[in-house]
Structure formats: C-alpha cells, structure tokens
Image (spheres, rainbow, N blue to C red):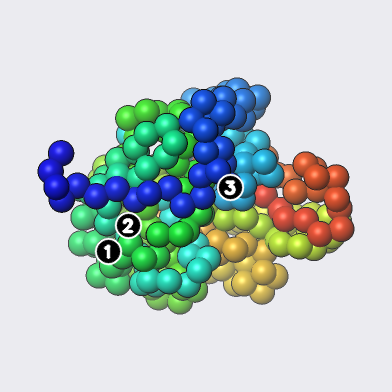
Amino acid sequence: MTSSYTIRPSAVAGMFYPGDPQTLLDDLRGYINAAPQGNARPLAAISPHAGWHYSGHVAGAVFASIEVPNRVILIGPNHRGRGAALALDPHDAWEFPFGEVPVDRELGALLLQYCPQLKEDSAAHAQEHSLEVIVPFLHAKNPAVKIAPVCVGTHDAHKLAALAAAVARAARETGALVVASTDMTHYLSDKTARAIDGKMIETLTSLDPEKILAAALGEQALCGAGPVYVTVSAARENGARNFEVIRYATSGDIEGNRDAVVGYGGFVIS
C-alpha cells in the first residue's frame, strides 16, 4: 500500500445500516438466507437503496437469487446534486464497518475510455447512500468482489445513452455484473403506490429504455430513473431478453403505516 492509496469513508453506516460490524454481518446473512437461494448469472440487477430496516429484505432477495461475479459496475442516482453529471468514484477502496471493498480501477478506466462524458469525481459520491447500502450485499455473496461505482445526476437521454454503451462494452469485455440502484414511488398511500409501481413494473418488463425513462419521469415512479435506463439499455445491448420480478414491497409492510409509503422493487435482467 502506498501513500497515494485512497479510501472513501462510509457515509451512512450507523444510519442506513448497522455501524457495528457483527450486527451488520448478522443482518446481511438474515436478509439473504431468508430468501429463496439461486445461482443465476444475469446480465444485470436492480436493487433498492433505502435503509436496510425498510428495504433490506428486498435487496437480500435479489442477491440471494444470483451469483455475484468478481467485478460489478454499480450505477446509482445522485440525491444531493453534487459533482459531475456522470461521476466515477476515484478511490481505491470503500470503507465499511467490516473492512474495505476494493474499487476496480481497471474496470473504471475502461468506462472512462468508452464514455468521455464520464468523469472521475469524488464529490458526487462523498455523502451519497444509493450505492453504499448495496455494496455489503455484493461482498456478502462474494468477498472477492471489486466495484466500479458510478453516480448519475442527469436525465439527459444522450448522456445516459453514451454511458449505457460504455457500460455494455465494459461489462461484455470483463464479465462484470451491472447493478442499478433505485427506489420506487415516494410518500403516496400504499394503495396508490402499488398501483403506480405496478404499472412501472409492467413498463420495465418491456426492456425499452426510452419507454422506461419516460414513464419513470412522468409518474415520478423511480428515483433512479437514469441508472435504470443505463442498466436496462446496457443489458439489452448485451442480449438481455428477460426481466424477472424478485420481490416488491413498500415501507408500509414494515411500519404498518399505509398512509405515506415508499415502494421497493428487486429485479433481475437476463
């Protein structure tokens, strides 16, 4: 390790997921082991990014159902609006209570090479939770995993398409899994949320990125509309034909409060 080795410190440990290492690992095992186990090798997956108390069982079901390879391209929304519109994290590793997860700098270099609009930018990632909450699930399934984290802060279809093409090429050349981070509808009644989310899921099954982006923005149905566009487009370019719903839930299922819920969906694309 040299003096130039850099680590992104955890931003939401102790808030979105446990800050105690043993509690964190116990919770991870609980979420993953409670779901049906599988060994699918999909092109892509979509996972929620709320606090684990609310959506951990959905994320756990997604990653229980698949094999996680050694390389993963993670694409999530930029909630705070900081940094570049398309931002690749430049650190060497991400810190978690249980240790570090390495960043795949070689895979990141391919993404930068193939997408000139993508910039190395730590500011976009510094306080962002949308990818951080997913990484421990990847590590739990494969302790050798390396990540290439991309934060998306735009709905510009031209920029998203350029990133999607780069992600498709890099994933094809390296065998990387592509994982999008998104929650679904926010703060609607449970009944309304399920209706809108149900229509959104029907649209997602089309694997039509333009149709998905338009529907997501029109209904405000996906806070990670950009990452989902990129992930679906990249998977489709690499031959995806199938969209599988692994689990859907709302925060009302956990809280019991059905007046204002957030929707969570877990999906696999193959």
Residues at discs 1 and 3 in contact (Cβ within 8 Å): no
Residue, x 46% and y 48% (percent of image)? 132
Q: Could you say which disc has been placed on residue 120 in the image?
A: 1
In whole angstroms, how far apart are the C-alphas of marks 1 and 2? Answer: 6 Å
Above or below residue 229? Residue 61 is: above
In whole angstroms, how far apart are the C-alphas of marks 3 and 2? Answer: 22 Å
Say which amino acid is labelled 2: Asp
Which quarter shows the N terminus?
top left
x then y, percent, for residue 99: 37, 34
Residues at discs 1 and 2 in contact (Cβ within 8 Å): yes
Q: Could you say which disc has been placed on residue 15 in the image?
A: 3
Question: Is any part of residue 150 visible from this angle?
Answer: yes
Q: Which of marks 3 and 2 is in front?
A: 3
Say which amino acid is labelled 3: Met
x then y, percent, for residue 165: 34, 61
Q: Mark 2 points at which residue?
A: 89
| Side of 243 relative to 8 (left or right) | right
